[in-house]
Amino acid sequence: MDDGLVLNISADATVPAKRNDSKKSGRWTDRVRIKRVLKRKVRAPDTANKTREVFDGDGESPHPAKRPRRGKDSDQPVNPVVDRPKPSTQIISSLFSHNPKIEVLQPSPRKKSSCTPSNAPLAYMSGFAELGLHPLLVAHLENKMGVMKPTSIQRATLPMFTRPPSVTMADRDTFIQSQTGSGKTLSFLLPIIHDLLPLSTHSYIDRSIGTLAVIIAPTRELAKQISDVLQSLLKLKLRPDDESEDTEDSPRYTRWLVSGLLSGGATKAHEKARLRKGVPILVATPGRLLDHLQNTSSFNVGKCRWLVLDEADRLMELGFEDTIRGIIQGLDGRRRLAMQAVKEGKSLEVGGWDWEHRRRTVLCSATIREDVQKLAGTTLINPIMIGSFDGEQENQENLQKGDAPANGSSSAKFVPPSQLAQKYIIVPLKLRLVALVALLRSILSQNQSKRECKIIVFMSCTDSVDFHWQLLGGTAMGGGLEASDANSVDEQLNAGEKVTNSEPTNEEVTVRSTLLPGALVFRLHGSLSTPTRLASLRGFSAASPTLGKQPAMSSILLCTSVASRGLDLPLVRAVIQYDLPTEGGATEYVHRVGRTARAGKGGEAWSIVAPSESEWVKWIQEKMCSVDESPSDIQKANIVLEGTGVEDILAKGFGGSDSEYETRATGVQLAFERWVLRQRVHSELARKAFLSHMRAYATHPTSEKYMFHVRNLHIGHLAKSFALREAPKNISGFNKNAPSKAKTTVSKHKAREVGVMAGRSRDHDTGLSGRSGDAEVRMKEAVRAKGRLIKKGGKMMSSGTSEFQIASGDALEKLAQRYAT
Ligand SMILES: Nc1ncnc2c1ncn2[C@@H]1O[C@H](COP(=O)(O)OP(=O)(O)OP(=O)(O)O)[C@@H](O)[C@H]1O
């Protein structure tokens, strides 16, 4: 049996030669035993590695080869000088045998051309001017930002704020919901600037007026992104280009409108200094904002007239409900104190400020789930809903009451943009890793003619992201090869593995893989430091990313769900869900795929589905459709996922004739496995990633267990997709057969525990993780407990000075401990 593994991968010179198994001396029983063992085994072609490789190939045996028992010696510590895993017998199972049979997929009847983009600017509109937007803003959008026509959510939202007050909803708050990539950010930023710009005409106005608008976003990345868009809007020209329009009567605007960002990225002292100077429009993450409301006396926010809660559903998911209540109480308290100070003549403020002008709250959310309704009920006054809702009237009434929808459905219909091509591949577990590489290669080569191509790959946990990132960067084959087509895989393999001396360090931002020519690989998850996360995003989004002197055309981002919400990364051609979402169900899926196909552009979304998860395809399609939708509606909205065979992807990605791709895929897999074996630190990375992945997998909600149950996974095959050759029972910490939390159907509560066990690996990213996030985590806990305190009759406190406080950080924590139930 040759198993198709005749690959000319050169031996790793640093590895000692394999010891000879034949034995001439010793007892005759020993010699007979060894002979018998050798007869049964088929030798691996690579004998350079001290590791003995046992092939399980081509169906000779229906069961995977068993790993022989290890002798006493195997427990001896690894030689500290050569830091490599201890020699052991390894199982090298063939990639293409013993895989479950997968139904041949029928091509989808969907015609791509029939899809008109659902989130594109509206062609029939003449421009933003007809929505009543300030002419300076219209000119800036058209001339400097290339934004000519509004999208449908902008068309619906802007008139609400630009019409004269008598007919608008001055006394009403707003709830905005629309598709991913439909331009929600501009639909709340433009009204704010439109409202504040004319204040320039007041003689006393400058940035010392304080903060007039606060925008809250759930993560640092999102806050930074909103802040960037805001900054580019605020660069607007304050006079019309046409001088003739600049008459005596035309208002003279001054540049007092500046923006600021509070997201925990900078030091508090620096943020305090900025707040003291005055920041008229502030973008913030919730924890840091509440912190400043509690502790920064110079934070002048008494006149705030806009509060925006972006990605409200994510804010709720991340447990910010109490923090947001604290923020609202803080804003109200500071307003009362400021008004009182003016009344009592204690304030140095010049008169003329319209204190009657109430603060408007805008809530943006992808869904109107029960928890978002609750938030809307407590934060919005007489809200008007803008967006696409089913049963709008009913929902509107519920929203005002803060109730869940009467029909019991917990979410409004939320579908991906119609122009997005949604695809899935059912991939046997063993083939996952090579299928991912093949898919990346095929997308990259298809888009070679385009200027650049960006791909986002979602993984289940931070450990998995770290492992795959290091693996791709570390497994350099024939270093420096720049293959331009899929056929060059052979050349890369034949050139031999190259031991890279410079392993990427933990805080490095990017790596290159010769398997993915012309692309740089970035990573993003919540355990990276803020500068690394931001550098990663900057690098990935850059027009022509570079590594050293080598420019790259394309970029790939390996990430956890941290990148699923709100991030607007330009030119993302494809999203690959290597691991399907463990939390958030269909909503999370729609958010993830929504990172592509934005503002009317095209894109493709790929889901890698395990054979035991195949029910998921039907499930997700049903979740995205309304019960009463006709098949033509479903086709039109492009809610159907199109299946592709894994062989097609492997053939496209690795090239070659007939089934040559099998040999090539095997070569790639072997190279990965050798990388894992090469150093102890690599195998630890792989094991950790495997374990964390299993734990994350166990946190799928109970209602989804029939599709995602650890019990249904072939653990050995899954381990192979982490380039591990070891039988999983030897991976400490996880035993599929033990009565573990992962094994039994876990309740949601238990599932959470499993998630917590995974520690840093589970990425409920809030921008709270990492070194600088610890304080925020504690703050969040304290605020939660403060909620309990208030329920138990505690009250908000005002310090002797003019500062309104909920309580100081320390006091709050002490109170929290005292009242913790
Ligand atoms: N009227 C417009 N014309 C052209 N491009 C636009 C327009 N409005 C917004 N865009 C662009 O569309 C992209 C998506 O916008 P935005 O990030 O606001 O979407 P979103 O609805 O908030 O998406 P998500 O739900 O994923 O957060 C951005 O790159 C933005 O610059």
Image: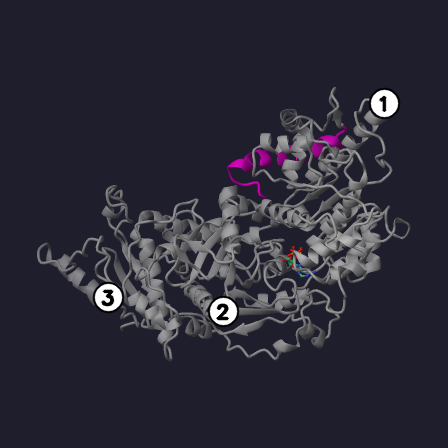
What distance separates the C-alpha of mark 1 from that of mark 3? 89 Å
> To which residue does mark 2 refer?
447
Residue 361: in magenta span: no
Q: Position of residue 306 (x, y in %)?
A: 76, 43
Q: Earlier in the sequence, mark 1 or mark 3?
A: 3
Quadrant in which the C terminus is drawn: top right
Q: Earlier in the sequence, mark 1 or mark 2?
A: 1
The answer to whether 293 is drawn above or below residue 398 in the figure is above
Camera-nearest residue between 621 and 243: 243
Q: Mark 3 and 2 residues: CB-CB less than 8 Å, in contact?
A: no
What distance separates the C-alpha of mark 3 from that of mark 2? 37 Å
Camera-nearest residue between 339 and 590: 339
What distance separates the C-alpha of mark 1 from that of mark 2? 67 Å
Helix, strand or loop under label 3 = loop
Q: Is mark 2 within 8 Å of ligand 1?
A: no
Helix, strand or loop under label 1 = loop
> To which residue does mark 3 refer?
45
> To which residue does mark 1 refer?
344
Please provide the residue range marked out in magenta.
766-793
Q: Position of residue 385 (x, y in %)?
A: 80, 55
Residue 789: in magenta span: yes
